[in-house]
Amino acid sequence: MSAAGGRTAAPLARRRARGTAGADGGADGGGATVISGIGVVAPTGIGVAEHWAATLRGACGLGPITAFDTAELPIHVAGLVTGFDAERLVPDRLRVQTDRWTWMALAAAEMALADAGLDPAAEDDPYALGVLTSSASGGNEFGQREIQALYAQGPQDVTAYQSIAWFYAASTGQLSIRHGIKGPCGVIVSDGAGGIDVLAQARRLIRRGTEAVLAGGTEAPLSPYAITCQGTPEMSGGRDPRTAYRPFARSASGAVPGEGGAILVVEERERALRRGAPTVYAELAGTAATHDAHRPAGPPPDHRQLARAMHLAIERAGLTPQDVDVVFADGAGDPVRDALEAAAIHEVFAHAVEAVPVTVPKTMTGRLGSGAGVLDVAWAALALHHDTIPPSVNLDGEDCHGLDLVTEPRERAGLRHALVVARGAGGFNAAAVLRALRHDVG
């Protein structure tokens, strides 16, 4: 056996030995899948500490789009990432080759790895780690610039990097190359549901033997062409950041887009403890995905498939609705979709819906497309870790479909389990249940 073969054989054998049939689909190694690292680039801050501090302040990151003139565009307000120094956070060579959404993924991944105390270069087996990202619209700003060059100057002025910078899999590919990660890698395209979908896939990979996975998503949809594409009836044309996006409010007028997202490190709990991970935030206890199977655009006729995703995630976590202590809602901000989600929450928690707090912290960021679901999961993990429910902003005094909508941070909330709900354009539904570990993990 060669030296290279000797280095990979033992870890591979360990991974194969762990796999047995599991109730949640695929192979089950028997260990809990946990979140051990969080990297955030969002309108609420850069880095997990800044993000969480801004969250507790209820700092709204929505603002008027000023990078270009929106007078003739359908959207004027968005969630804006400020203070993102790409020159400091992303190497020059990669900045030239990639779009802003990938810059954010590269930066968030570095933060997540540092937070987890995990160095891919120090791993014995490069095939033991994986990368999964969600994508909704790809490299918008880069693509628009190159299309303009094509029509103004001709094809000779279009950079060769256009072929990879806009591509849905660009962030996954660049992350795997940068960190030498040669295990399972992929991309999932299901809009706002994608962040949960990639975490579900990461959990399956870990239960089948992959040691750890960088998983998450980012979005940078704030170019004129991208804004034009998002100008649907479900999006808000409001110009006041305080009222443009108000999910579950009777005065809701639509959603606003936002940039940013999160990358997480997920791994088996025993591995995280064994290698001395500084923090283990929460367990990813159960996930589910459904589809409305209705039509490509427009809301479904009822809430059944969304409620089914919620029920399945709770069931797969080995829980009942009575065990859920907080719901991180999708919060479409569109009156019809809000009513459908409220109906789903009422159905799932029919035993005592008024006793289950519901929060929409993305009111501070806007809806981040492929970064939305994973940022909500990051929020939920931090909420469980700190035993504090983050607030929804700009919603005080509203009648919100009979839901207990959290508008101020609730500390010492006794949180054990959180349900995160996400939806994507085209009928995608996803849900995840997280379990608190603060009582038995240092």
Image: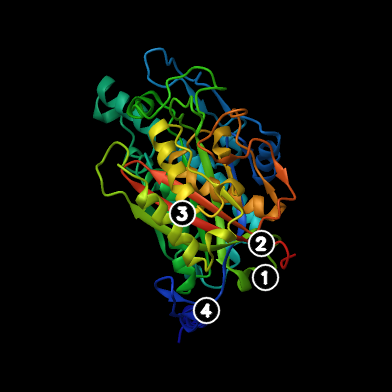
**Residue 131 showing in the rendered view:** no
Q: CA distance from mark 4 to mark 3?
A: 32 Å
* Dot 1 or dot 4, earlier in sequence: 4
Task: Name the front one of labels 3 and 1.
Answer: 3
* Dot 4 or dot 3, earlier in sequence: 4
Look at the numbered disc 4 and give the secondary structure of its residue.
helix
Q: Which mark is residue 431?
A: 3
Look at the numbered disc 2 and give the secondary structure of its residue.
loop
Q: CA distance from mark 1 to mark 2?
A: 8 Å
Q: CA distance from mark 2 to mark 4?
A: 23 Å
Check disc 4 and report the residue beneath it: 11
For the N terminus, which image quadrant?
bottom left
* Dot 3 or dot 1, earlier in sequence: 1
Instruction: Indicate the amino acid at tag 2.
Output: Val
Check disc 2 and report the residue beneath it: 280
Tell me whether the residue at label 2 lies in contact with that at label 4, contact meaning CB atoms closer than 8 angstroms: no
Instruction: Indicate the amino acid at tag 1.
Output: Leu
Task: Name the front one of labels 1 and 4.
Answer: 1
Considering only vertical position in the picture, is 316 above or below 256?
Answer: below
Tell me whether the residue at label 1 lies in contact with that at label 2, contact meaning CB atoms closer than 8 angstroms: yes
Look at the numbered disc 1 and give the secondary structure of its residue.
helix
Q: Quadrant of residue 325?
A: bottom right
Between residue 339 and residue 240, name the one nearer to us. 339
* Dot 2 or dot 4, earlier in sequence: 4
Q: CA distance from mark 2 to mark 3?
A: 21 Å
